[in-house]
Amino acid sequence: MKDVEQAQGILIVGEEACAELVGRKEAFEAVEAVFGAMASGEARNFPVVREAIGHADALYGFKSGFDKAGMVLGVKAGGYWPGNADKGLTNHQSTVCLFDPDTGRLSALVGGNYLTAVRTAASSAVSIAHLARKDAKVLGMIGAGHQSTFQLRAAVEQRTFEKVVAWNPHPDMLPRLGAVAEELGLPFEAVSAEEVCAQADAIITITSAFEPLLLKDWVRPGTHIACMGTDTKGKMEVDPALVAAATVFTDEVAQSISLGEAQHAVASGALSPDAITPIGAVINGAHPGRTSETEITLFDGTGVGLQDLAVASVAARLAEEGGRATRVAL
Ligand code: NAD
């Protein structure tokens, strides 16, 4: 018995291999598929654990789940170490453990830092693909941190965008985002948050804000907004009145109402949880998605463990096929 387990070993897939193997296309397909599986009841996220450890100001936790359609079982462990940047390390640190759903055996350890960014960008990209107007031309970006360039690259592949307008609470961070837009051949304009709303057909918010950055009256009819920064109780990127006025979609309703952008509108009674649709229902064809050119659609992308497991499983498969993984016996 022991020999069999040692011969199978555990795949170890490093950050570098993940970045080489899992591109935007692979991430988009994996995330879209798992959102569909969640909505059809074939995939389920388990309760999230996130705790302050009382050391290094760190937040540490686990996101786990099982996707029966894709046969992916695992956990992403990690969190946020705010002092890491001074040590030349990424503040967000994570690793994905994948288990064989038939036996419970640990099958792979996959670096989770790059994959978190690419799966988060895939999430807003899936929302744009399914909910933005087909004729969307101007992309608005609110936020210019680590995630923002991933978001921009994935978003522009969903529509024939002709221009990017952006605002960030810390304007000095914007040139880095502008350089990516330029690399993608798109004109880039740094403007006010209100002007982003006045020009953009699709807007991504990806900040650590705790107060609304976008107000309801600024946003034009027909806009699609992907709110990606709010992933914790207390955070807020847009006016709760805007959330209440929009047609709201999410990755997972339970997270949307407790720690996502919809938490505030739901807490005040302005939005009923029943009015929030899992985007998987649109992917599966059970919900029409956008039903008019004037409706404001809002995707509350809270970030679920199954997204991490989906892209990690792609990384493990491609690494094995391409001989890019190390195999060790436990
Ligand atoms: P980052 O630290 O690299 O950038 C932070 C961004 O937020 C910058 O645009 C910064 O100007 C802005 N910001 C910082 N403090 C602010 C404040 N007090 N008010 C308003 N804006 C502020 O972070 P990142 O890695 O780019 O992540 C951005 C956000 O996305 C974070 O809140 C993170 O938790 C969240 N996130 C969400 C998911 C998801 O799946 N939904 C995944 C990863 C990260």
Image: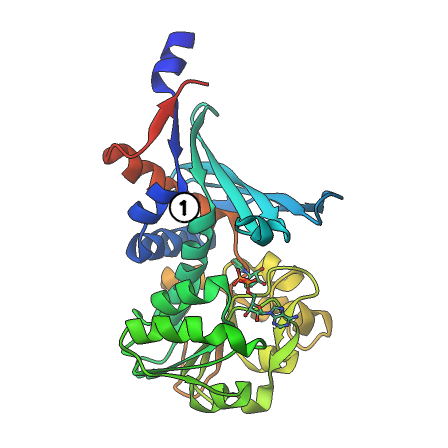
Q: Residue furthest left?
A: 322
Seen at 51% across and 46% down, the residue is 44
Seen at 39% across and 31% down, the residue is 12
Q: Is residue 306 above or below residue 180?
A: above
Residue 247 visible somewhere in the drawing: no
Residue 8 visible somewhere in the drawing: yes
Q: Is residue 124 above or below residue 6?
A: below
Q: Nearest the camera: 43 or 134?
A: 134
Q: Is residue 302 above or below residue 71?
A: below
Quarter occupied by the N terminus: top left
Residue 192: where, in percent of width, then height?
53, 88
Residue 84: where, in percent of width, then height?
59, 50
Residue 4: where, in percent of width, then height?
36, 12
Q: Nearest the camera: 121 or 239?
A: 121
Seen at 36% across and 73% down, the residue is 179
Can you tell me which quadrant of the image ligand 1 is in?
A: bottom right
Residue 72: where, in percent of width, then height?
42, 38
Q: Quadrant of residue 8?
A: top left
Q: Quadrant of residue 229?
A: bottom right
- Relative horizontal placement of residue 200, taking residue 75 as reference (left or right): left
- Relative horizontal placement of residue 141, taking residue 270 as reference (left or right): left
Q: Which residue is mark 1?
A: 310
Seen at 39% across and 60% down, the residue is 122
Q: How many numbered markers are drawn?
A: 1
Q: Nearest the camera: 154 or 180?
A: 180
Q: How is the image coloured?
A: rainbow
Q: Quadrant of residue 210?
A: bottom right
Judge the density around disc 1: few (<14), some (14-19), many (≥20) Cα neighbours within 10 Å: many
Amino acid tagged 1: Ala
